Image (cartoon, rainbow, N blue to C red):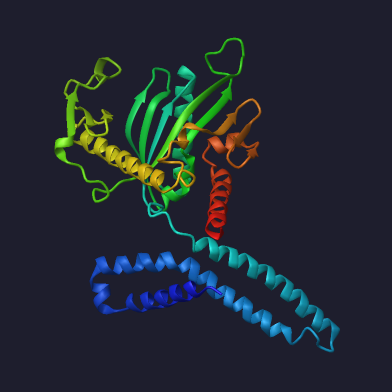
Amino acid sequence: MFPKVEEIEARFDELEGKLGLPDVIKDQKLYQKFAKEHRGLEPIVSAFREMKWVRDEIEANLSLLNDPDPELAKLARDENTELEGRMETLEEQIRLLLLPKDPHDERNTILEIRAGTGGEEAALFAADLFRMYCRYAEIKGWRTELLSSNPTGIGGFKEVIALVEGDHVYSRLKYEGGVHRVQRVPETETQGRIHTSAVTVAVLPEAEEIDVEINPEDLRIDVYRSSGCGGQHVNTTDSAVRITHLPTGLVVTCQDEKSQHKNKAKAMKVLLSRLLDLERAEQHSRISEERRTMVGSGDRSERIRTYNFPQGRCTDHRIGLTLYKLEGIMQGDLDQLIDPIITYFQTEELKRSAS
């Protein structure tokens, strides 16, 4: 039924044998490579083996369906009904696991949040979203590192960029890219009117140096004195860094660190990821307009979600999901949104692969 899975199972067994070899254990680089591949194959092999066991149980029960003992026959029928349901679930699970993997799913993520329409209220909501994602990262056991920020005077962000590191970060966050709309009464509103503001979120897989080749001659690097809050916080050295990639016109600035070297390293990290994102966008565009992904396609200009504070409601417009659990969501309880979205896009991918 799944000949490809039989090949995967054979490879899984082969890797299991190799992981026990003394020569492989001594070579930690090779061992880690085999161990990573082994872990990646485990879910599909586990589902396939359970499916084979379920199939054998169904066949074993067939001889009991016409047993003279009516109670035994009924027991076999009921058990087979349950097993057949489990078989369907496992078959669907295996089809999903066989879908081509996004090569970036296991990567860390550059998360960029920018205030859009709505002025100071948009900047405040950008800060709220940043806190929401940081709390979600804590719940998942991920690490968040601030790369760059442009704060406002009353606690908002015009822009904030962070690196999120952990297990399968990009696979969980990649559908968060887009326009997030907020409807609420701003703190500065004296007449109690509800305002609508927007914040854009970009989710980029962290680029590695081997992904993007940069000619040093294509970079213009400027250093300048970073802006501060005044008084003792004013930076008296030229530690802020602005990197311009001349061929694309991409500009990245970083001034959060006191060290020019650290600011330059963080800015380069962001630049590499943006260039990788640009490269992927061009590749997706060449393949098919229809199959573009949210990050790296321009789809991030579309409204994907609305957070309505007066109603305590959060709506994801892509899948028509509305949850009246806004307080929990803003505290980082995002799996209730992310899981259905991942399922939706996986189902769409299944439909495309079947057509």
Res. 37 visible in picture: yes
The quarter of the picture where the N terminus appears is bottom right
Q: Please identify the quarter of the rendering in which residue 310 is found.
A: top right
Residue 279 relative to residue 140: left or right:
left
Left or right of 233? Residue 185 is right
Say if residue 144 shows up in the picture: no
Residue furthest bottom in the image:
68
Relative image position of residue 188 (x, y in whole percent): 52, 14
Quadrant in the picture for the C terminus: bottom right
Q: What residue sits 45% from the left and 59% below the top?
A: 100
Q: Quadrant of residue 231?
A: top left
On screen, 346 above or below 252? below
Q: Determine whether 135 is above or below 81 in the image.
A: above
Establish if 238 lies above or below 324.
Answer: above
| Point 68% across, 68% down: residue | 85
- Image coordinates of residue 311 in percent, x first then y, are 66, 28
The mark tally for this picture is 0
On the rendered structure, is 19 left or right of 190? left
In x, y percent, where is residue 37?
37, 66
| Residue nearer the viewer, 302 or 167 | 302
* Residue furthest out toward the top: 190
Residue 74: x, y in percent? 81, 79
